[in-house]
Image (cartoon, grey):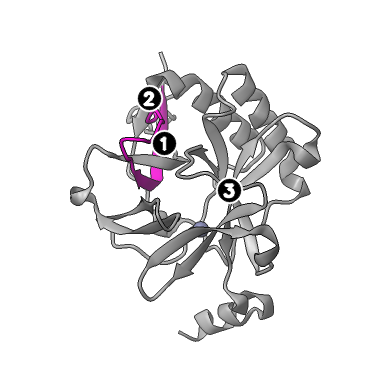
């Protein structure tokens, strides 16, 4: 039987948001295959696809934990020390990791599916979501196989589709990073007000042709510097 193994994953080791390639046509087949898996396992409403990325560095004992404030309809996402997280803190975005290898043969232990949380959220009493559990293992293993087949294991992970508050049809969730405070702030903005340098990062997959298949649930704002590639130049100077 396939076992679900949870291993530590380092958010900081994911590619930087300014360097990661936006969703493009070369991802379509992979998304269509993932949608097929999710549909077969009855999990289209449970899991979405996440573009794996980071915004700043964390210490090895820190994790990114999201809290929601209903009144201001804002999500605050910041580093918390691992030992300060409690049972109401659940993983919401997961990367597929290379599993354990057998000490004798050096081969991957195939009875084990290894995943690592790269994003956490503090659940409220009102949140209606089941944390990841053993009943998801088969579905997740099939998604991992799709990602391997398309060579996108390091590019995409999965996300629990958790809605913290409702959006009106013309609103999108947009995340901005305050690198100095190491805080991500995600808020609903009117679609037309969001004409910044943004990139889709979490998608729910749904029926329809490929162009309408991936519905973007969350965008991240990229640094405006990126437009002129200043940021990369700046990084190299350091
Ligand atoms: Zn982001």
* Mark earlier in primary sequence (1, 3): 1
Q: Secondary structure at mark 3?
A: loop
Q: Quadrant of the N terminus?
A: top left
Residue 92: x percent and y percent?
42, 41
- In the rendered image, the vertical position of residue 146 relative to residue 220, given as above or below: above
Q: Secondary structure at mark 1?
A: strand
- Evaluate whether residue 193 shows in this view: yes
> Which label number is shown at residue 115?
1
Residue 141: x percent and y percent?
51, 26
Left or right of 176, for residue 103 = left
Q: Nearer the viewer, mark 3 or mark 2?
A: 2
The residue to which callout 2 is attached is 133
Q: Secondary structure at mark 2?
A: loop
* Mark earlier in primary sequence (3, 2): 2
- In the rendered image, the vertical position of residue 27 relative to residue 206, given as above or below: below
- In the rendered image, the vertical position of residue 160 relative to residue 81, given as above or below: above
> Cβ(mark 1) to ligand 1 < 8 Å?
no
> Cβ(mark 2) to ligand 1 < 8 Å?
no
Q: Who is closer to the viewer here, 228 or 9?
A: 228
* Mark earlier in primary sequence (1, 2): 1
Residue 40 figure quarter: top right
- Residue found farthest to the bottom: 237
The residue to which callout 3 is attached is 155
Alpha-carbon span between mark 3 and mark 2: 23 Å
């Amino acid at each position: 039987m396939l076992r679900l193994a949870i291993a530590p994953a380092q958010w900081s080791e994911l590619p930087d948001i300014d360097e990661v390639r936006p969703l493009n046509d070369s991802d379509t087949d992979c998304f269509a295959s993932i949608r097929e898996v999710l549909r077969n396992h009855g999990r289209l409403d449970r899991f979405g696809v996440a573009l794996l990325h980071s915004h700043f560095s964390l210490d090895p004992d820190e994790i990114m934990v999201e809290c929601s404030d209903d009144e201001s309809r804002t999500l605050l996402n910041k580093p918390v020390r691992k030992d300060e997280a409690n049972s109401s803190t659940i993983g919401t975005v997961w990367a597929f990791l290379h599993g354990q290898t057998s000490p004798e043969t050096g081969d991957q232990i195939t009875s084990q599916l290894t995943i690592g949380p790269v994003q956490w959220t503090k659940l409220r009493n009102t949140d209606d979501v089941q944390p990841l559990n053993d009943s998801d293992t088969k579905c997740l293993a099939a998604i991992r196989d799709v990602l391997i087949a398309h060579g996108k294991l390091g590019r995409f992970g999965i996300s629990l589709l958790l809605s913290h508050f409702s959006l009106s049809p013309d609103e999108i969730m947009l995340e901005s990073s305050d690198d100095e405070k190491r805080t991500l702030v995600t808020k609903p903005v009117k679609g037309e007000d969001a004409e910044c340098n943004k990139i889709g990062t979490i998608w729910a997959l749904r029926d329809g042709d490929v162009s309408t298949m991936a519905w973007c649930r969350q965008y991240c704002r990229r640094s405006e510097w990126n437009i002129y590639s200043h940021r990369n130049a700046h990084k190299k100077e350091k």
